[in-house]
Image (cartoon, helix red, strand yellow):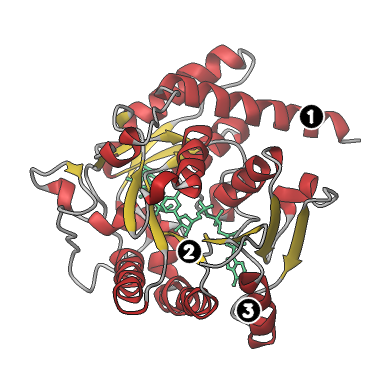
Amino acid sequence: MGASRGVIAVFGGGGFIGSHLCQRLIDQGKSVVAVDIDSEKIANLLSEDSFTFHEADITDEENDELCREVIKEADVVFDLIAYANPQQYVDKPLEVVELNLFENLKIVDLCEETDTRLIQFSTCEVYGLLGNRDDIVFSEDSSNLILGPIEDQRWIYSCAKQLLERMVHAHGQENQLQYTIIRPFNFIGPQMDYLVESPDEGTPRVFASFMSALLFDHPMYLVNGGTNRRTFTYIEDAIDAIMLILRNEGGQFDREIVNVGHPNNEVTIEEFANRMRTIYAELSPDGTLPELRTISGEEFYGEGYDDSERRIPDTDKLQSAGWEPRYSLEDLLTESIQYYIDQFESELDVQP
Ligand code: NAD
Ligand code: UGA
């Protein structure tokens, strides 16, 4: 890698993780160039001198030159662009592969061509069904990656991300690409997905889905009884980890795969729903609590849905770099729910 170019590029900078990352980078005095099709979540950054935003669809060939220029001018490229919602994996599997694998590979190629470090977002879903067996703590370099049958279309996302990881790794081995792969474990916080006033408007990921139910009083659906478990990570803890990976002291994350997740925040989805209800009732005593309803995965998402039962990250790599997550499940839910209550109330205030 040559002399410093002074800029960090964030592909997918308008999304949930991207918006928090851009904010933190700017707060730390970095110059940031973000590329996304959407800028709603970063509207507050658009007037910052150190922030440049390109509203561009990376699948449109007309933007290939723009992507090349952005990458060529950057010290580091974060690639967060993907379809990242399980409803999309069963509804439009081909588009998921097209974007999450083939379009992302174009960014990988450009990083290699321009000798630019790549921080590629993958997913904890690459471990797939591993946690349905006895191995529930997942290690980046030794755990197996286990997926279900082809007809269970849900795994297409994981499969595309796994092949992307394998390609990035191979480019590192054969062509000296400098990279780090991040596997996030269920990040939660402000600006996550979107809220739905009624369940017909879409299916955001579980926190946004339950938050919508609490604010708009429609049922909270427990898919297959809510017995599956997740380890939830607060977005601020996640960004702390990502910043350590960016800093890459002594090259400790060079060509590494890194789990980012809070191993102690494991909970069943039923318990998660109940904790949200309790905290919501405390923070918004006038609000009503919606019905909790069990539903099958097929009825909720459609044919081809399957799920992981458990997934807990091994975080040794991050902890040896000094990372300790600060937000317990209670803390992250309180912060996130309060944010949405405030936002909901301020929107009510501006209505005529
Ligand atoms: P997100 O959907 O909020 O962000 C993705 C962004 O990509 C969006 O802003 C979207 O507008 C943008 N995008 C999509 N198609 C585009 C295109 N053709 N051109 C330009 N921009 C486009 O998702 P997120 O939760 O912020 O996730 C970011 C990354 O992290 C994804 O790669 C996802 O797979 C991965 N990930 C996230 C989580 C999590 O907990 N949020 C967990 C595991 C993996
Ligand atoms: C997510 C997505 O695939 C990605 O965002 C990401 O790669 C990864 O996992 C992650 O966030 O680490 P998943 O954890 O299944 O997948 O995402 P959610 O949609 O948030 O679902 C979590 C659990 O809640 C699942 O068991 C799901 O069936 C359940 N659920 C979801 C409900 O019971 N009710 C709902 O309304 C929504």
Q: Quadrant of residue 181?
A: bottom left
Which element carries disc 2, helix, strand or loop? strand
| Residue at position x 40%, y 58% in the image | 180
Q: Of the residues shown, which amino acid type is indicated by label 2?
A: Leu
The picture places residue 151, in percent across and down from the top left corner, at 23, 73
Extreme-front residue of the structure: 3
Q: CA distance from mark 3 to mark 1?
A: 41 Å
Q: Which residue is mark 1?
A: 346
Q: Of the residues shown, which amino acid type is indicated by label 3?
A: Arg
Q: Which residue is mark 3?
A: 68
CB atoms of marks 1 and 2 within 8 Å: no
77 and 267: which one is in front? 77
Mark 2 residue CB less than 8 A from any atom of ligand 1: no
Which element carries disc 1, helix, strand or loop? helix
Q: Residues within 10 Å of mark 1 (few under 14, many from 20)?
A: few
Label drawn at residue 118: 2
Label drawn at residue 7: none
290 and 108: which one is in front? 108
